Amino acid sequence: MQYLLAAVVVLPLLGAVGALLPAPPGLKGRNPDQAVLRHGVTVTGVVLAAALALAVGFDHDHPARMQATTDISWIPALDIRIHLGVDGISLPLVVLTALLTFLCALYSYFHMPTGPSPKAFVALLLVLEAGTLATFAVLDLMLFFLAFEMVLIPMYFLIARWGGAGKQAAAWKFILFTLLGSVVMLLGLLLIGLKSGTFDMVALATDNGPKAQLSHTVQVLAVLAVGIGLAVKSPMWPLHSWLPDAHTAAPTVGSVLLAGVLLKMGTYGFVRIALPITPEGMHTFAPYLAALAAIGIIYGSLACLALVRQGAKGDLKRLIAYSSVGHMGFVLLGIASMTPTGVNGALFANIAHGLITGLLFFLVGALKDRYGTTDLDALAGSTGAALYGKAPRFGGLLAFGAVASLGIPGLAGFWGEMLAMFGAFRPAAGLSRPAFLTFMVLAGLGTLLTAAYLLLVVRRVCMGGTPHLAAIAPLGAADPADPDAGPAAETPAPAPAIPDIAHYEYAAWTPLAVLTVLAGLWPAALLGLTDPAVQQLLGGGK
């Protein structure tokens, strides 16, 4: 088991090096580009197989215990160790990361984003996977910081080199926000390690361990510093402003990984570090975190409503990015409640958001490939998408993703948000219940607003909009407004059909849709893993 976990973390790095080397004779395929893209699919597939084997071999009767552990001294002078392990909290995130990266590599094999050489693309994708997996697997604060930072450079280049309009500005905004947050976070981690005498996250999580050396003041300062870095990545309002630009400019697979796994690194840090290691400091800041989470839920929903209205020229990718601000607000609200119910809801919402939003970004990217735009007014016009009539399976899957995202019972999006609100209904002892009830009401209002904008998206994109709106036809179709087009300028001809879901798109998207249904119908499979680990984490290792 320990070799499996080490392989899950190290194999993507070795694969990234291999992607930059010439393909061996006999494996070049039709051309070098195809060979390196196939290499990416192979490596991510092996990593996914190892992650699934790790999940199968995991002792499900004792999910609170760290398993598959490796503990090797690295820098003895600072007591920094190569300490790896997974429990019921981190295992689902490891599997989710491996799955989404494999699906992105598979999708890119058939539909490589426009940009430089695929060699660099595949290498960056694998480095990004390694950094994300390491973040969820390491148990040393300094290693956590290194893994946390490791993902920034590959994501920066994926946006800057393979992104769309405004990619340079979006990439710089992403790197500056996250780097500045990380500098502050490093100070907090160093404060914890130096004051306690260790950077070991397992030892620090126990009540009778080094955590006893952390005074209330130190815990407050540590939570403030570490929390800022984690909040930027989460993303928490008002530190979220880098996210819409990054998602709008990123290539499809960049958006999938950014929403599906990178945002989870921040909320995972709150659960793994802030809650168990600095509980007194977290208790001090919990009401403020909950308030900002509730504001983020409402803000994200109102921003989406503004983008979806007629004439707003809203971008569908940008709308889903703002929806992530709202959805991650539920995760932060559950964490801020400091109760097992709320934290379990936050962890469930993390996984659900990765599945559903990953699917939505895949779909929106494919929609842009078919129409050349994700402008909602264009897609809703008389010659716009109207997916139910032109590509019914594509339209049905988009409607499914939207319905799952709004949190309908029976799908994955429902359980996490419901449990997060239950946690706010009865927060931990010492937290103001009237304040948290207010936050719960705001979160409930956010669910109504979420349903409103997502149903409007389905209405406008899948069914079509009103005839008087300006619109475009699919790529290659004649422009009905062209003065040389004759009578067609006055009576637009029906837009030609567009391709429905291709075979490689079925392969990349079906697992996400199936898991969304399974998680909604069988939530105990995930909650049975997380709950014992959460109980032990909040109980000081008991």
Image (spheres, helix red, strand yellow):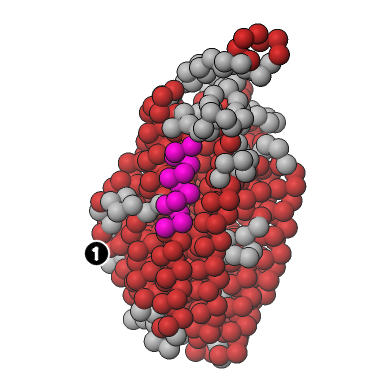
The image shows residue 397, relative to residue 346, as above or below, that is above
Q: Of residues 165 and 268, which is closer to you in this image?
A: 165
The verdict on residue 458 being magenta is yes
Which quadrant would the N terminus be assigned to in this image?
A: bottom left
Amino acid marked by disc 1 = Asp
Please tell me how many numbered marks the rendered image carries. Answer: 1
Q: Is residue 128 visible?
A: no
Residue at 57% over, 22% down = 474
Tell me the SS state at disc 1.
Answer: loop
Name the residue: 60% across, 28% down: 471
Magenta residues, as a range?
Answer: 448-460
Report the residue at 44% width, 38% height from top.
459
By secondary structure, the bulk of the magenta-drawn segment is best described as helix
Relative to the observer, which residue lies in front, 55 or 333? Answer: 333
The image quarter in which residue 389 lies: top left
| Residue 138 % position (x, y) | 50, 63
Residue 160, given in percent of the width and then of the height, sits at: 71, 42
Q: Hey, which quadrant is residue 436 in on the image?
A: bottom left
Can the viewer see residue 150?
A: yes
Left or right: 7, with 37 as reference point? left
Residue 179 belongs to magenta span: no
Which residue is rendered at x = 48% and y = 42% of the image? 457
Q: Quadrant of the C terminus?
A: bottom left
Assess disc 1: are there few (<14), some (14-19) or many (≥20) residues with their C-alpha within 10 Å of its C-alpha. Answer: few
**Residue highlighted by disc 1:** 61
Relative to 140, 91 lies left or right: left
Residue 315: percent from left, percent from top:
60, 41
Task: Please state the horizontal and vertical placement of residue 47, each as a whole percent of the image.
Answer: 45, 44
Is 7 above or below relative to 225?
above
